[in-house]
Amino acid sequence: MRPAGLGASGIGHSSGGGALLIGIGNPLRGDDGVGWQLVAGRGLVCHQLTPELAEAVAAAERLLIVDAWLAPPGAGPLLRPVVPAAVWQGDSHRVDPPRLLAIAALLFDRRVPAHELLVPGFDFSCGERFSPRLRSQLPAARRLLNGWLAGSAAEPCRA
């Protein structure tokens, strides 16, 4: 099964300018669905990163992965660069952003600049609603996302 948003060739939607957005998480687990919501209509959405995404990554000029994270108290959304893993060790069940970049480099000889936008999640219980605390983080997360799309994400930044 192909992740939502992938076309017949396996190459996903682009938000323009060669940018690829990937929202990961589970929209049926509360705050875990924030990546899906922020990327909806602009990129790919999937439950987790898999090696099959390497083709879409290699075809992009740059990549942004959006996900929820268990942030330390008081933290807000975080936009940071992703450094490719030195090697990919072949574990298809644990593909994180650095390993996905390593797979794209290995299979397609492409090194794509990448960032991840991490939005603090607080409630991962069953349901499709975001917690009030996550909802309060959405404006800052959208600002970081729009800034990245505009090309202004050179360094890690917090909203």
Image (cartoon, grey):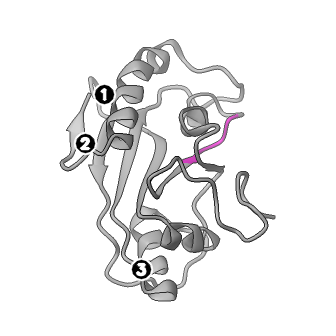
Q: Is residue 27 left or right of residue 120?
A: right
Q: Are marks 1 and 2 in contact (CB under 8 Å)?
A: no
Residue 19 lies, in percent from the top left, at 45, 54
The image quadrant of residue 156 is: top left
Q: Within 10 Å of the Cα at label 2, are there few (<14), some (14-19), or many (20+) other Cα atoms?
A: few
Helix, strand or loop at label 1? It is loop
Q: Earlier in the sequence, mark 2 or mark 3?
A: 3
Query: What span is colored magenta in the figure?
Result: 23-27
Name the residue tied to disc 2: 152
The residue carrying mark 3 is 110
Q: Quadrant of the N terminus?
A: bottom right
Residue 14 percent coordinates (x, y): 56, 53
State left or right for residue 112 relative to residue 20.
left
Q: Is residue 24 magenta?
A: yes
Depicted 45 relative to depicted 112: above or below: above
Which amino acid lies under the numbered mark 3 shown in the image of this protein?
A: Arg
Rendered location of residue 146, percent (x, y): 38, 33
Q: Which mark is residue 15?
A: none
Q: Is label 3 in a helix, a strand or a loop? A: loop
* Distance between the alpha carbons at the discs numbered 1 and 3: 32 Å
